[in-house]
Image (cartoon, coloured by chain):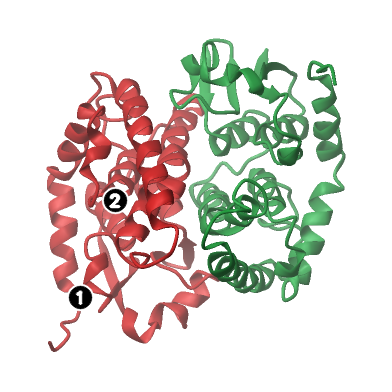
Chain colours: A red, B green
Amino acid sequence: MITIFGAYNYPPIVDGIVRHHRALWAAEESGLQYKVHWMDAAKAEHREMPNRGINPFGKIPSLQDGDFKLFESGAIVNYLFEKAGKAPRDLEGRAKLAQWCYAALNTIEPLGTFEIFLWDTFWRERVGRDERRTEVVNQMRARMAELDGALGSKAYLLGDEFSAADVLMATVLTFARSEPTIYEQGPRVRAYLERCQARPGFQRAVAAQSGAPKIAA
Amino acid sequence: MITIFGAYNYPPIVDGIVRHHRALWAAEESGLQYKVHWMDAAKAEHREMPNRGINPFGKIPSLQDGDFKLFESGAIVNYLFEKAGKAPRDLEGRAKLAQWCYAALNTIEPLGTFEIFLWDTFWRERVGRDERRTEVVNQMRARMAELDGALGSKAYLLGDEFSAADVLMATVLTFARSEPTIYEQGPRVRAYLERCQARPGFQRAVAAQSGAPKIAA
């Protein structure tokens, strides 16, 4: 049985953004059976064992599949698709998949959508916000125009087939939900994001979150 | 023949940091034949064709192998190792490799070593530098202690075998060369970085840079 380690009781401001969502989504898309090991974020349980025994950095999500242990959401999402036989098997196909996974996690997220999220949540009162936030939003507007051109008429990043790269790209785009103007020159990116989130697998992953322990208000 | 797209004539402050280095290093480790298509960074040639035809974001490195085109350094490095038969072939082995590749590019680089590089180069005069730089350096000190524990007595991230993950981790660590105190509680990480950079493949990749066109002083 596959176990995904996720968190509950985190600040409401990160609801829908927490990185275990992408693992749950991939698990739902894979069709594999899995369960969730919920950890109390307010008690920083993810920084302690057993999660620390999987991820030396004490972050989420982590995964355990029998004796096999894995961390990094990019690796977990790919593992789930590949285990389910829903990934390219040839060298070039795998490389193209990796290309778009890394594009999401390295070209769009850092100094990009995730930074917009930080400026609009935890960093709202920081000095330098106006200058840097404007800079990164402009950068992301340009990136979305470029991504729009790369998507073209494709349904998903690899073409007709939804892949691990789409789970990563869609969740990375969601970090910038406070700044929808980034799509002004990227209407096909916005449509792509909506197409990804309309998938039943995404909806089931959102519902899976309700399996987390309830916290008294 | 494999062609790697790299840049020359960039600001000296990024010497040794430019991301084509990791592709050259992987190419040298792979033993595959390759050539470099050098682009003038000062003229932003990487933002134009032919590079833009490979990478819609106009960044380096890119790769062309016959008709096959690839961007994102993480994907390129893995492609070269895999094409050379120097990568795990089983599901779990590939997942562990991916885990460490993503750890380098997502847990160590963003809001980490690359941000230290930015604060110590292009962002030296920015407001908020003292507060944020201190924060990220402290974060990286903790990460290096965690990475030290994960390395343990291993020579490389996957064990005895040097892999694509080591090319990525070593180049990502190099971003923070201006702040060697991050290794105070990570002596095995520092030794690991030196071990990686002592490899003949690394040295040959550094030398390959000298094949770039010369710019009149």
Residue A201 visible? The answer is yes
First along the sequence among labels 1 and 2: 2
**In this rendering, position of residue B57 left or right of residue B36:** left
**Element carrying mark 1:** loop
Q: CA distance from mark 1 to mark 2?
A: 18 Å
Q: Amino acid at mark 1?
A: Ala
Q: Classify 10 Å Cα crowding around label 2: few (below 14), some (14-19), many (20 and above).
A: many
Q: Position of residue A13 (x, y in %)?
A: 24, 68
> What chain letter is assigned to the residue under label 1?
A
Q: Which mark is residue A212?
A: 1
Residue A44 pos. (x, y %): 39, 82
Q: Observer-nearest residue: A138 or B80?
A: A138
Quadrant showing the N terminus of chain B: top right
Q: Amino acid at mark 2?
A: Ala
Percent of width and height locating residue A21:
27, 59
| B108 with respect to B201 (left or right) | left
Q: Is residue A58 left or right of residue A20?
A: right
Badge 2: chain ID? A
Q: Which residue is mark 2?
A: A26
Query: x, y (%) of residue B121?
Result: 67, 48
Please indicate whether residue B150 sits to the left or right of residue A86 in the image.
Answer: right
Residue at position x 70%, y 29% in the image: B10
In the rendered image, the vertical position of residue A56 relative to residue B168, given as above or below: below
Q: Residue A1: tell me if it is visible.
A: no
SS at badge 2? helix
